[in-house]
Image (cartoon, rainbow, N blue to C red):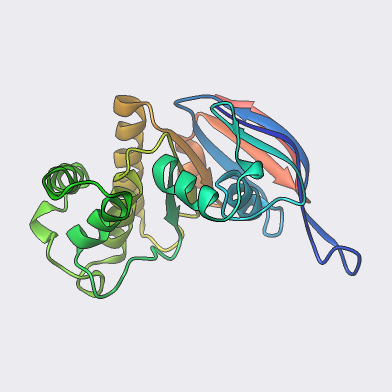
Amino acid sequence: MIETKNLSKIYNPGKFEVNAVNNVSTLFKEGEFTSVVGPSGSGKTTFLNCVGGLDTPSSGDVIIAGENITQLSGNSIIKYRLKNIGFVFQAYNLIPVLSAKENIEMIMLLQGIDEKDRISRTNELLNQVDLYEMRNRRPSQLSGGQQQRVAVARALASKPKFVLADEPTANLDSKSTSNLLDIMSQLNEAENITFIFSTHDQRVIDRARRVLTLEDGKIVSDNKK
């Protein structure tokens, strides 16, 4: 379970202040498949970054499975993210000199998982995202949709409790988007992984079972399907 309490993020405090996230309190239950939507500048990405510990809120709390991660700092928050949170970014953020399998395996290497288990988990994920035959290709040798599927597999490598995806389909065509959403939906249902998307994409919104709408950093609607 993820809970935000009076979460706020202010940029340029005391000057030309921007309330990117403004006193947001909400709850995400285990196994949710949620889209966070709103116009550009509504605070979607900042909200997701605060929830995932990539950004430090100006005030308020983020509580995950009973632990207040806003009280963690330095190496503690890095270790927490590494073990508990999977991230999927619009720009893929794959390491260009590594192959698909090496990009996926890197997270587990940082976790100190032994080689046999790393290889087994990597192959399992490559099969889940239908890229086993392309495991030795580098990102430049993969299409945008294939790179994003590698990014999803990498996000799942550590067996996280939840995955945060920031505009994951923004650079994908319709077929690649549909394939990616199919994979995420199947993983959500089969493994009860919580997915929270920041998105403008109606195709993602249509698949979500909950749609949380932000405007000017505030929740203006919260609809479950």
Q: Is residue 175 visible?
A: no
Q: Quadrant of residue 6?
A: top right
Horizontal and vertical percent position of residue 205: 52, 41
Horizontal and vertical percent position of residue 173: 36, 59
Residue positioned 35% across, 39% down in the render? 184
Q: Quadrant of residue 172?
A: bottom left
Instruction: Out of 148 and 125, give the one closest to the viewer.
Output: 125
Instruction: Out of 56 and 195, give the one closest to the viewer.
Output: 56
Residue positioned 33% across, 66% down in the render? 94
Taking 138 as reference, is 183 left or right? right
Residue positioned 12% across, 65% down in the render? 136
Instruction: Out of 126 and 142, give the one closest to the viewer.
Output: 126
Taking 184 as reference, is 132 left or right? left
Q: Is residue 37 visible?
A: yes
Tell me the quarter of the image containing the C terminus: top right
Horizontal and vertical percent position of residue 21: 74, 49
Q: Which residue occupies the extreme right position in the image? A: 14
What is the tally of numbered marks visible in this picture?
0
Taking 209 as reference, is 184 left or right? left
Above or below, 5 relative to 46: above
Horizontal and vertical percent position of residue 120: 12, 43
Above or below, 192 relative to 86: above
Taking 31 as reference, is 127 left or right? left
Residue positioned 54% across, 49% down in the render? 77
Tell me the quarter of the image containing the N terminus: top right
Above or below, 222 relative to 86: above
